[in-house]
Structures are given as C-alpha cells and as structure tokens.
Image (tube, rainbow, N blue to C red):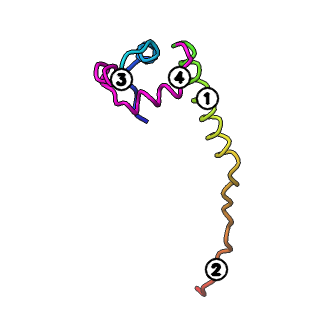
C-alpha cells in the first residue's frame, strides 16, 4: 500500500476546511489531492482528531497482523511421508 504524503494533522486540517464551508474543489486543488481522496478521508476520518486517526490506523494494522498470523497458524502442517526405498540388492 502506498504511503500518504500528508500527515494525519494535515488530513484533519483539510477536512476541517471542508466542514467550515470552503469549496471542496478549491481545497483539493490547494492540497494536491483528488476529490475522491477527499471524500474517502471524509467517510473514514470525519469526526476524528489527528491522535484518534493515528490510533485507528494502529488498531487496523494490529488486527491485520493478527489475522495474518491466525491464517498461517490455522493451515494444516505439511506432512512429508517417507516412501520406502526400492529393494536394490544386487549380486556382487
């Protein structure tokens, strides 16, 4: 996943500008983001402060790691059976 160029505080500031009534197109142009990005952030972080944003991201990362570990743990172990060797008794 691509790392964001903007910090959580910058995202919160951008969203606050939109809540204060500034035109979304002007905010996006000034911040260098698309309108879709703005509305995705709004849906995800609308009422969160920057500290809460960081906490949410950390929780999601921890849960993703736990899920990956559980998935690896729940797979059945690979069983390697030893096949009998052919009887190669050759006369000398």
Label 3 to label 4: alpha-carbon separation? 16 Å
Question: Circle 2 — which element?
Answer: loop
- The quadrant in which residue 29 appears is top left
> For the view shown, which residue lies furthest in the bottom direction?
91
Discs 4, 1 touching: Cβ within 8 Å: no
Tell which of 53 and 76 is nearer to you: 53
Quadrant the C terminus occupies = bottom right
Identify the residue at horizontal 40%, vertical 30% (top origin). 37
Q: Do the CB atoms of the residues marked 3 and 2 lie less than 8 Å apart?
A: no
Look at discs 3 and 4 and give the one toward the viewer.
4
Circle 4 residue: 45
7 lies above or below 1? above
> Foreground mark, 3 or 1?
3
Residue on which disc 3 sits? 5
Between tags 3 and 2, which lies in front?
Answer: 3
The mark nearer the N terminus, 3 or 1, is 3
- Residue denoted by label 2: 86
**Horizontal and vertical percent for residue 22?**
38, 15
Q: Earlier in the sequence, mark 2 or mark 1?
A: 1
Report whether residue 86 is seen.
Answer: yes
User: Which quadrant holds residue 14?
Assistant: top left
Quarter of the image containing the N terminus?
top left
Nearest the camera: 71 or 85?
Answer: 71
Q: Secondary structure at mark 4?
A: helix
The vertical placement of 55 against 73, above or below, is above
> Which badge, 4 or 1, is on the more N-terminal residue?
4
**Residues in magenta?**
24-49
For marks 3 and 2, the one nearer the N-term is 3
Residue 62 is marked as 1
């Amino acid at each position: 996943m691509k790392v964001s160029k903007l910090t959580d505080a910058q995202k919160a500031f951008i969203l606050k500008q939109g809540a204060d009534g500034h035109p979304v197109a002007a905010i996006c142009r000034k911040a260098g983001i698309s309108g879709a990005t703005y509305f995705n952030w709004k849906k995800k972080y609308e009422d969160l402060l920057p500290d809460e944003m960081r906490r949410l991201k950390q929780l999601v990362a921890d849960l993703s790691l736990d899920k990956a570990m559980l998935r690896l743990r729940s797979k059945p172990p690979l069983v390697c059976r030893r096949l009998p060797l052919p009887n190669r008794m050759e006369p000398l």
